[in-house]
Image: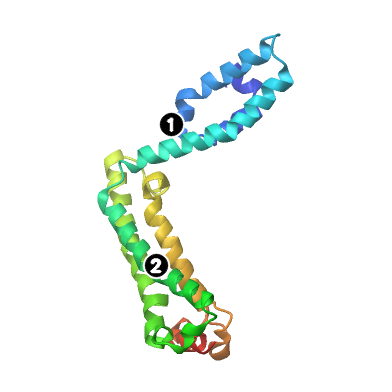
């Protein structure tokens, strides 16, 4: 460990919030600049520390956004395509829930709240979004691992390029979990989380409110 790293151990931990590549190239320079300013008698130590700590969040955010945007340029087109498709598949859930809320739950008396329609936009579409993006993400992880010569875990943790697919997967699973855990589902199934085979009854329960 260098003398600068020993001098600023806590500040150096904050620098870990920078992208790894940026930290690798500029960490020593950042620490040296801070040390020079603190050692300069013309600069107040308190003011120097205040400026360094106040500038840090803005700088970290700017670099994270910059490196993420750069990483996205190397994201395969198929991963972006399935992420966009998945986003469209989960959109009806949010639109219909919002529309039903704005209209005082009047949709419950229309075809949009029929059990078969609910099955499509509450379960089938989010499930399809999850499956498509899981398949695309799994393919990307294998390719990334082979191309970079790194472990599968390293490829899995490379979320700068895979985050669109992962976001769709999380949202889709969240919708499905919400449906099975809806507080009105107990009227027929008790605990729907333990009785996933009663999805039809759960949907009927929600339909009746």
User: Which residue of the protein is positioned furthest toward the front in this rendering?
Assistant: 103
Q: Is residue 96 above or below residue 133?
A: below
Where does residue 179 sit, x and y in percent of width and height?
Answer: 49, 76
Q: Quadrant of the C terminus?
A: bottom right
- Say which element carries label 2: helix
Q: Could you say which is closer to the camera, residue 86 or residue 5?
A: 86
Q: Badge 1 is on which residue? A: 21
Q: Is residue 35 above or below residue 96?
A: above
- Say which element carries label 1: helix
Tag 2–tag 1 contact (CB < 8 Å)? no
Disc 2 or 1, which lies upstream in sequence? 1
Q: Is residue 48 above or below residue 185?
A: above
Asked whether residue 2 is in view, the answer is no
Q: Badge 2 is on which residue? A: 90
Q: Quadrant of the N terminus?
A: top right
Where does residue 176 sit, x and y in percent of width and height?
Answer: 45, 72
Check residue 86 in the rendering and tell me which mark sits there, or answer none.
none
Q: Nearer the viewer, mark 2 or mark 1?
A: 2
């Amino acid at each position: 460990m260098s003398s600068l790293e020993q001098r600023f151990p806590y500040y150096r931990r904050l620098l870990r919030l920078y992208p790894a590549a940026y930290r690798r190239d500029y960490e020593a320079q950042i620490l040296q600049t801070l040390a020079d300013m603190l050692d300069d008698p013309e600069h107040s130590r308190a003011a120097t520390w205040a400026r360094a700590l106040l500038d840090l969040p803005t700088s970290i955010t700017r670099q994270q956004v910059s490196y993420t945007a750069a990483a996205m340029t190397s994201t395969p087109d198929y991963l972006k395509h399935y992420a966009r498709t998945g986003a469209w598949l989960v959109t009806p859930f949010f639109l219909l829930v919002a529309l039903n809320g704005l209209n005082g739950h009047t949709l419950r008396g229309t075809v949009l709240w029929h059990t078969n329609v609910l099955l499509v936009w509450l379960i089938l579409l989010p499930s399809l979004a999850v499956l498509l993006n899981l398949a695309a993400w799994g393919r990307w992880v294998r390719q990334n691992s082979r191309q970079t010569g790194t472990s599968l875990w390293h490829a899995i943790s490379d979320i700068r390029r895979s985050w669109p697919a992962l976001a769709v997967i999380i949202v889709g699973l969240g919708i499905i979990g919400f449906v099975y855990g809806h507080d009105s589902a107990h009227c027929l199934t008790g605990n729907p989380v333990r009785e996933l085979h009663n999805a039809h009854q759960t949907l009927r329960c929600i339909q009746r409110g």
